Structures are given as C-alpha cells and as structure tokens.
Amino acid sequence: MASGTARTVPPSRPPVRRKSRKDWRGWIFVGPFMAVFALVFIAPLVYAIYLSTFRNQLIGGNSFVGLDNYTQLLHDASFWHALLRVLLFLVIQVPIMLAIALGAAMAIDSARLYGANLFRIALFLPYAVPAVVAVLMWGFIYGDQFGLVGQLNEAIGTGLNPFDSSWILISIGNIVTWSFVGYNMLIFYTTLKTIPAELYEAAELDGAGQFWIIRAIKLPALRGSMVIATIFSIIGSFQLFNEPNILRPLVENIITTDYTPNMYAYNLAFSGQQQNYAATVAIVMGVVTAVIAYVVQLRGSRTEDL
C-alpha cells in the first residue's frame, strides 16, 4: 500500500442558504388589538377624510369636490374665531391648572400637611363628578339672579355676573380647572412617590433645605409627568365642548353655536346638515391638535436630555 499517495480533498461546497421562515405566531397576540384599533380608529378617520372631499349641493346632490372644503375653511371667519378663542383659553387656563395641581402634589408629598389624605381625596373628588352634572352645578352657582352669585350680589352688592361676555371664558375655565386639578395632582403625586428616599437623606446630609430639595430633586423628577399632563391638557382644551354647550341655554347671545371648533363642527353636522364640512373641521382640528401635542412632547424630551 503506497502510503505516500496524497488524498485529494474535494472542494467544499458553499453553504446552502435556507430561507428563514417567518414566524406569524406573534400576530395571534397583537391581531385582536390591531383589529380593534383599525375598527375604532383607522376606519372612522379614513371615513371622515372621505366625507371631507364631498359636498352636498342642492343641484347635483353629493358630489366630489376634492380639497374645496379645506379651501373654504381657510377663509371661514367663524372657524378661526373659534380656534383663537380656544387657543386663548389654553394659554391661560392650562398653566394655572397645572400650577395648582403641582402645588397641591408638593404640599401632600411634604408630609407636613395636616389631613393630607382627606385633602387628596377632596381634591380628586371633582374629577369623579360627571361633566354634565358639574356644569349644571356651576351654572346654578353662577346665576346672578338665582344662584350663589345672585345671593352675594343681593347681600353685599358685588355686581358680579359670570355670564357676562367679558367673564364667560373665565367662568368656563374655572369649571374645567375645578374638574381636572385633582386628576393632574394625582399624576404629579404618583411621580413624587417614586423618588427614592435615599436621595432625600443624601440631600439633608449635605445641608439642603426644602427649597433646594424641590429644585434639585423633585422638579427634575416631575419633568416627564409635566409633559404628559400638558399634552393631555392641550388635547382637552382643543376638545372643549361640554362646558360651553351646556351653559349655552343660559347665555345664547354670548355662547354661540360656533363658540369652539367642536361646537362648530357639531352644529354643522346635526343642525346645519353639513356633514361634509363638519368632517373637514374635525380633520383640521385633529391635525392642529396632533402637531401642537407633538411639538410639546419634542420640546419636553429635549429638556429631559439636557
């Protein structure tokens, strides 16, 4: 046997790539959510966009008009007045409401407030009151002829009239603030309870007082919660509807059918039989709300990264 004969090694074959098989089992878990999401969010949105491209005309019936409804909305003074009114409401009411909620959360978390648990429940209780009931209650209180304000006017002659044109937006803001301070307070208070106690102990060992603890520990920890609360409040302000709509029978000459964009869209759809134009108003308001909420979130995220 010739041991010196070299054995030839066959050339190695390139590895055969097998096609990776997609695993669809994940859709079993996310499928139900995606189906509900498509049904309750995507489908109404697509249908509203579809409606906004049509116009119901006396001659010709419901006909496709493209972007004409959007062009009309750009020149609609009623819409712009309503939008500016809501923006004014947002700029004034939201900071006041969040400042009160933040102060209340700080006071409860300080453990120096007597009856903190009772105070927390009392502050949150208005949020549990249905919006309709809250507005009816405040509508009675605001009455300058029959309510608490009327009794004050009669007793000491204050001359207050919350239903006056110069006061009505403040009156609505007071109702919204009363209803949602407790909700925002709970967001802030829950965040404060997540701060480790070791941070407070270390700060006290370094001689930090309450002012510096709030500035260096509590406020930085609350930034994320404040961004969330601000976004919720912005969305709620653009959706302003219940309060002015329920108060409207008391002051029809001041709170008109186009007082807010939501009231405008509602009355266009159900009183004016202009569902297509109402859908246009709803789509534009949705875009405005999403853009402003996104800018606030982006701004808040950058602040957290600094």
Image: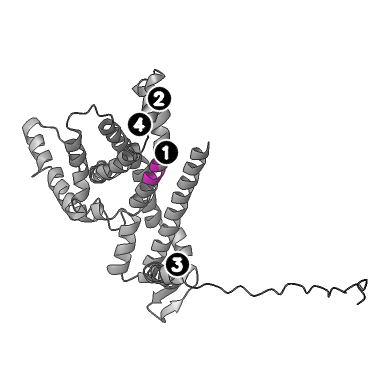
The structure residue drawn at horizontal position 69% and vertical position 73%, both measured from the top left corner, is 17
Query: Dot 2 surroundings within 10 Å: few (below 14), some, or many (20 or more)?
Result: few
Q: Which residue is mark 2?
A: 202
Instruction: Please tell me whether mark 2 sits on a helix, a strand or a loop.
Output: helix
Above or below, 220 against 88 in this view is: above
Rounded to the nearest angstrom, the CA distance separating label 1 from label 4 is 19 Å
Quarter in which the N terminus is drawn: bottom right
Give residue 69's mark: 3
Q: Secondary structure at mark 1?
A: helix
Alpha-carbon distance for marks 3 and 4?
A: 58 Å
Helix, strand or loop at label 4? It is helix
Q: Earlier in the sequence, mark 3 or mark 4?
A: 3
Q: Is residue 177 visible?
A: no
**Nearer-N-terminus badge (1/4):** 4
| Residue under numbered circle 1 | 223
Q: Was residue 159 drawn as part of the magenta stretch in this picture?
A: no
**Residue 237 x %, y %:** 34, 49
Q: Position of residue 261 (x, y in %)?
A: 35, 56
Residue 104, picture quadrant: top left
What amino acid does circle 1 point to?
A: Arg
Question: In the image, which residues are magenta?
Answer: 225-230
Identify residue type, mark 2: Ala
Q: Main secondary structure of the magenta part?
A: helix
Residue drawn at the location 21% of the way across and 53% of the way down? 131
Q: Which residue is mark 4?
A: 197
